[in-house]
Amino acid sequence: MNIGLYRTVAAMRTNQQRVEVISSNIANAETLGFKRMLHVAHGSRNWAQHPSHEQVVTGTTLDLQQGILMHTSQEFDLALEGDGFFLVESPDGEVMTRRGMFSLSAEGVLTTTDGNPVLWDGSRGRIDPGNGRVLVSGSGEVVQNGQAVGRLRIVAVESDADIEVDPNGRYRLREGKEYIDSDAMVQQGALERANVQTVDELVELIAAQRSFEMASQTFRLISESYQRLHR
Amino acid sequence: MIRSLYTAASGMKAQQLQVDTIANNIANVNTAGFKKSQLSFRSLLYQTYREPGLPLANNQNDVTGLQIGSGTEVSGSRKLMSQGLLELTGNTLDLAIEGPGFFQISLPSGENRYTRNGAFRQDAEGRLVTAEGYRLTDGVAIPPDSLGISISSQGEVFSLGPNNTLAPAGSIRVHTFANPTGMKAMGGNYYAPTAASGLAETRLAGEQGAGEIKQGYLERSNVETVDELVQLIVAQRNYEVNSRAIRVSDEMLAQVTQLVQ
């Protein structure tokens, strides 16, 4: 059988995946703190020795580029500028997030929208709900009424590959990796938007569609030439 | 292939809800004491086809892994409790709170509700009530022979008697919450406390972080029409892009079916 037939199928499959990844990015264009996924495809090593349909290897990586900050003027909306994450204690372990839409519980604990407590450097800082405005400095120091409350834990990772995306789209540190210090600046009263540029995604989408189309046209050409051969 | 159809559809649904929220904000641009809502989204389940670093079928290690998300969903909405502009009305019973806090209203059922709409009036017994006739819980009652009402920024109510003497007629308290964005909007500009907002703390106006009371002012809605319009345009464009993704997926499907003829 013609090896090209399998190759066109591999190309179609790759571009189908590309469309799926792009669709997910586009759907999350308004998700705060969302980081887009990149679809990567490359030829496999020693490709001539492998079955044709396994000659393309596809994968996804996170694009951690900074998203645009949106000003909200809310006291507990915190955005990060630069590489880094807030740490959050979820029921199933620590997660990293750049979605700084926090709120204060009645007990004075800073929590995420899911109700999970935000982690602090050292012991958890307690903010008195009825005791005036809270100021958060660029380095994450929290001050209320001139009194230091503590410092928020902000971490970075050595490489983007150290981050694991769990099924719920939350970021976790891969096993065996460690956090490093972050030089990100905290902006109070702002939130980070998704780093999805819909125009770029649209271009990618069309490119993927055309590649898919070309592959399917090629498939048809090959299959038609077989038909002619058999006549 | 079918996956991206659903992914993009989830994006369209989310944008539709976003437009609904913006429309409600814009509709309430002239509602006294109205607080705008904001939707927030989160990404839906990620499917992991291959863990990073696992060997592939052809005996090579791959560092990237393959994970594909399946769209977005609304994770929740919140009321932005920022201060609205204070508008001078000159009505003695128009009250605005400058700073955090709410007026406490008692429903006929006995439940308490909270509002920042301070357009009060008097009922037959001289008590302060809202436009709907719900009573202010502070039990302020103005004597029938009163010639005028004066309310201090601390919420002390004085009534001007027939012989030009000021007599105290009770005081209006401000009620604060640990997390006012967590309150539940009940319609009619009333809010109810929830587990997320915490319980109401009764405060003297202007103390312990509570706002001051301004007589003769009403708090306008904190909706900025321009901001909402910009958001509306963004939502519409996102809707369009998502629908484009659906079309592309559909066209690709059509090509596949053409192959099998």
Image: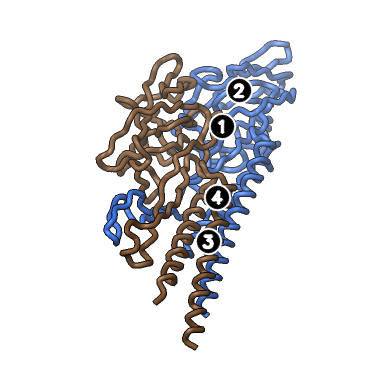
Chain colours: A brown, B blue
Label 1 with label 4: CB-CB less than 8 Å: no
Residue A8 image offset from top left, x and y in percent:
46, 67
Q: Amino acid at mark 2?
A: Glu
Q: Which residue is mark 2?
A: B98
Residue at 39% of width from left, 49% of height from top? A168
Cα distance in 3D space between marks 2 and 3: 60 Å
Residue furthest left as drawn: A176
Residue at 63% of width from left, 36% of height from top? B34
Does dot 4 land on a helix, a strand or a loop?
helix
Residue at 54% of width from left, 27% of height from top? B101
Residue A143 or residue A173, whichever sits in front? A173
Local crowd size for mark 4, using a 10 Å CA cut-off: few (<14), some (14–19), many (≥20): many
Residue A213 sits above or below residue A124 on the image:
below
Does dot 2 land on a helix, a strand or a loop?
strand
Label 4 with label 3: CB-CB less than 8 Å: no
Q: Which residue is mark 3?
A: A211
Q: Which residue is mark 1?
A: A72
Cα distance in 3D space between marks 1 and 4: 26 Å
Residue A191 image offset from top left, x and y in percent:
51, 34
A151 vs B184, left or right, is left
Label 2 with label 4: CB-CB less than 8 Å: no
Residue at 49% of width from left, 77% of height from top? A223
Cα distance in 3D space between marks 1 and 2: 19 Å
Q: Earlier in the sequence, mark 3 or mark 1?
A: 1
Cα distance in 3D space between marks 3 and 1: 41 Å
Does dot 1 land on a helix, a strand or a loop?
loop
Local crowd size for mark 3, using a 10 Å CA cut-off: few (<14), some (14–19), many (≥20): some
Q: Are marks 3 and 1 on the same chain?
A: yes
